[in-house]
Amino acid sequence: MRPTLLFLPNLNVGGAERSIAELARQLHAAGHPVILALGDASGEFLNQLEPRPPVVDFGTSNTFRAIPALRDLIRRENPVSVLGALDHACVALLIATRLSGRRPKTVVSIRSTPSTQLAGPLPWKDRVILALSRQMFRRADALHGVSQGVTQDAVAFYRVPAAKAITIPNPVITDAVLAATARPPHHPWLIERPATTLVAAGRLTDLKDYPTLFRAIARVHASRPGVRLVIFGEGELRASLTDLRTELGLRDVIDLPGFSANVLGEMAAARLFVLSSKTEGLPGVLIQALAAGTPVVSTDCPSGPREILADGRYGPLVPVGDDHALAEAILAELSRPRQSPPPEAFRPYRADVVLADYLRLLELA
């Protein structure tokens, strides 16, 4: 049987990298032929591929330099379908496919709302990628979005015919994820004071809007001095966030321990999980928190949280960038007994539920 080919620049920490790596692993584990092609076979998620599907390493950090080798791979393997994630990788994949002389089903996978991700002035390289994306994505056989909001936004932003669009969520919840939520926490606050410790998780980047969360925690701490926050993640804003923490007098209230291999166990022990993002696609950490049995509070950012939380049924939604509203929602949750979200909150994102949809999309069924 002809394989499907998934293409990414690398497997560094990121939502697209995590979900595509997990999709490749699940397809391979289920006995479906899959090739995971990487511009550079590096990144934290590479070591988590067990069982590991066939991985092709083009040995370059420049995605466009991988086009000749990617073309040759497609020509040689003649895949039934190809899927790319992240705009520059999708453009490279579409070019390589056209040059290969093969005609697999081409799928462009969009992981976040492009109108917010690409808002404002862009560097010239990004402007070139955007122009190529708008020209070439229309020629793909399918545009895949990970949430309804992402799909609708991408159709309008890239000017793709709506008939080519399909929404399939990421296969976030696996048996391994559920097992990991049963691990004991490692962070001392979550061991010693779980009833008053909140958790957030994600890269320390502008789009996660941790400054708003910091200011919300300052308000919460003024009313409930015992409350603490742990943010698991690493990123380029560590220094500025550390400075803001000091400025707000929260050095003993907010901890930034970095990346944790036990984040699911930490989530499960926490009193509350908080998502403060400006924009998302389908925030896997929010779904994982639900699976961990942890109450959640989230911004109503585009897009994903409103769909995941069923318009607020499984957790309150607050306006983006509003630290007052975020603090009030946190305090309201802390004022009531801790109640785990029901299993139906995360069931739509179980791998065994969504894998059949991916098989149809990739023509492996």
Image (tube, rainbow, N blue to C red):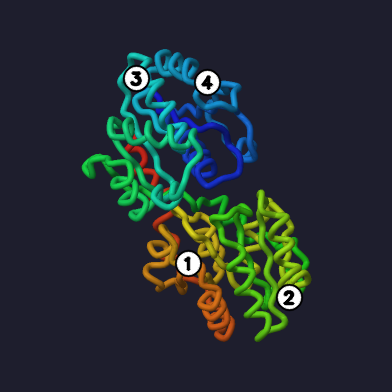
Point 45% across, 29% down: residue? 34
Classify residue 106 by image quadrant. top left
* First of labels 4, 2 by sequence position: 4
Image marks 1 and 4: residues in contact by CB distance under 8 Å: no
From the viewer's perspective, is the residue at label 1 or at label 2 nearer? 1
Task: Give the answer, above or below, for where 140 lies relative to 300.
Answer: above
Image marks 4 and 2: residues in contact by CB distance under 8 Å: no
From the viewer's perspective, is the residue at label 4 or at label 2 nearer? 4
The quarter of the picture where the N terminus appears is: top left
Q: Residue 110, position in %: x, y?
A: 40, 43
How far apart marks 3 and 1 lie (CA) works out to 41 Å
Amino acid at dot 3 = Arg
From the viewer's perspective, is the residue at label 4 or at label 3 nearer? 4
Task: Give the answer, above or below, for where 175 lies relative to 320.
Answer: above
Pointer 4: what residue?
65
Pointer 1: what residue?
320
User: Viewed as shown, does residue 85 lie left or right of 295?
Assistant: left
The quarter of the picture where the C terminus appears is: top left
Give the camera-side residue of 312 and 133. Answer: 133
Amino acid at dot 2 = Arg
Task: Label 3: state its secondary structure.
Answer: helix
* Circle 4 crowding by C-alpha within 10 Å: few under 14, some 14–19, many from 20: some
Pointer 3: what residue?
98
* First of labels 1, 2 by sequence position: 2
Pointer 2: what residue?
193
